[in-house]
Image (cartoon, coloured by chain):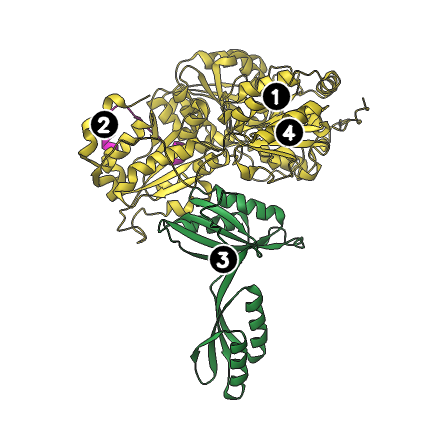
Chain colours: A green, B yellow
Amino acid sequence: MPKNPQNNSDEQKHTFAVLVENKFGVLAKVSSLFSARGYNIDSLCVGVTQDPSISRITLVTSGDVNILEQIRKQLSKLIDTIKVFEMDDKETAERELVLIKVSAPKDKRSEVLQVVEIFRARTIDISSDALIIEVTGDEGKIGAILELLRPYGIKEIARSGKVGLSRGDRTLQGLKNQ
Amino acid sequence: MTAKSSTPTNLKSKNLSGAEIIYRCLELEGVEFIFGHPGAVLLTLLDLFLKRSKIKHVLTRHEQCAAHMAEGYARASGGVGVCLVTSGPGATNLITGITDAYMDSIPIICLTGQVSTSMVGNDAFQEADIVGMTRTVTKHSYLIKNMADLAPAIREAFHIARTGRPGPVLIDLPKDIILGEAPFHLPEGEVKIRGYKPRTKGHPRQIKRVAEAIKEAKKPILYVGGGVIHADAGKEVEKLAEVADIPVTWTLLGAGAFPSENKLSLGMLGMHGTAYANMAVDECDLLIAVGARFDDRVTGKVSEFATNAKIIHIDIDPTAIGKNLPVEIPVVGDAKQVLREVNKLVKRQKRTLWQKRVERFKKDFPLTFETTEGGLIKPQEAIVILSEEAGADAIYTTEVGQHQMWAAQFLQVSFPRQFISSGGLGTMGFGFPAAIGAWLARPDKIAIDIAGDGSFQMVLQEMATAVQYGIPVKVFILNNYGLGMVRQWQDLFMDRRFSEVGLEVGPDYVLLAAAYGAKGLHIEDRKDLRPAIQEMLTTPGPFILDVKVDPDELVFPMVPAGGANRDMLLKDPRKKKPKKGRLRALPDN
């Protein structure tokens, strides 16, 4: 729930990459921070890094500048948080994986498959009435394919949540904490 | 206190029980007292209190009070308080105390028993997910699942609790961990946690900006909070105030950070602060906040708070800065270290005009109360006389409500940690157990709980604890037969419809004291105040002084909830000629 529902004109989406201790309970600490303070989580994605003692959380959230600043500070304040980094669209290679079950009866199937091909998506399951499409991409691409598939009837969607890495040689481990 | 003598060096290779490891780790941290209540999962740990004497276990009558006693001990000593309770209800009963410590940044360690690791999650008897329940009210928490993690976790917990912005840390101890065996190694070197490096040293550029802003300001105010007490930065605040000639106001938790008898002192600010503190803040052109967090009880309507001021905020917790209002000069760091650096740069200054103006506020809008002609006791006068009689020998704790505000307004608080109160959470029932813990930390002082009858009734079972251990806590009840602060709001804002605030039926406190084997006294006449207080202070052992006060007395000044501080009520607006707090603007100088 947004903190100031009547005044969300300044709301921005932001993506944080957070390195945390790979221990049980840490994800709960992160998510209860958001629920306790009434912050949004748009998506959250977590997995272990090349160092097995560290997990990486990619978290998409929204709020005004002050809320985003608080979120960054509050995340850093958790004892199990090692690093917090605000990901910038231009500096970051971002991807999300989405599985889309779309209605595709015989007479529409080739049209749907054309969309799949144009987006370099993949068909991973097929039945008489529906396809499951796997598509990977940034927000723009995912939005576009969903838009194009919508008229055919999207039955179900599963999204992985966004992950990302800084472009170039930079790594999060190598950065000074903000 | 060190534990060198009791820790033979040949233990390195030997296996020890979990209970023994816990005890040794606590010894190494210098723990003197544990406040606790037993339970089945703690048996082997409890057994050690029979065999060993280094750490004394204080048996409380309710777990919530164990947490408050640990807080009282920590708040009075500056050390870490420890409490130990069993799983399930023992642990859940701690939660109010933990939250209280979290809100006021008090370092306590909460050791909770837990069902065996194999039973965790099975809804076993007396199982509660206490780590889950306390996640947002602890600075950090541990559920120990491996023996090897036990000793390092305890050491980390103490480090986390006492450093940075202090706070409560919970360690959940499953039964099989307490019973298990593992090799014990004496810890070496400093505690290192890769995600936890609190910044204590302020950024030199920011410190320079602070000094410049102080130099340029015409009407600066220092606004100090609990962080100054935690950082032991009272002397540094005094130096800055004296050298740069800056009046000082404090929050409830900052009482004692600056001596109230100092001529630069403005007393407490905020909802029930002094009129002159609120006026000075309203008019100041530079507000220097140190270890304070712009709580809503301080700021009133935040958009109307200190609108003429540039704001400097010095705090060890970056999340506190810029949370409630924008700050021009943020400085992240330990209050003592930052102020030391600031003091190096600040030159002696005189601010005659500003001091005159502030003097004028003090003279025209003093903190007062009306005394009655008859014998009816005004609670404020009771506090004034208590303060005169007890002086610097006292450590005061308070409960929460009207009496707490009168205490903050009328006590002379001369040194840090002399005044101990539940600020952020506002926990009724805090003061009495906190006084017990505080006395154990400072047995050279007289621990006095300034109480209301409502608050004291929440925790009066701890009289047994005080008597059992011979802890000479003085309970000074300002008895108005009701829940005064809520009654005050009903009085002012609900047309005097007093709903559910009457405590006409309460115990006879003298008989209650006697029932527990303590002494007590009633008074209801003004002339008895001083002799009764003297008797309370000189009678050995726990004592209850039941002071029957005027139940219609209200706390003023008061900023109505959500209102701006400058619109505070100086007295009951329904009485004749209410004086409004507004002052004409200071003529340009």
Secondary element at tag 1: helix
C-alpha span from label 4 to label 2? 58 Å
Q: Nearer the viewer, residue B83 or A120?
A: A120
Q: Residue B293, percent across and down?
A: 58, 34
Residue under numbered circle 1: B345
What is the crowding at mark 2: few (fewer than 14 residues within 10 Å), some, or many (at least 20)?
few
Q: Which image quadrant for residue B342?
A: top right
Amino acid on which disc 1 is placed: Leu
What is the crowding at mark 3: few (fewer than 14 residues within 10 Å), some, or many (at least 20)?
some
Q: Is residue B437 left or right of residue B313?
A: left
What is the crowding at mark 1: few (fewer than 14 residues within 10 Å), some, or many (at least 20)?
some
Numbered disc 2: what chain?
A: B
Residue under numbered circle 3: A164
Do discs 1 and 4 belong to a common subunit? yes
Secondary element at tag 4: helix
Amino acid on which disc 2 is placed: Leu
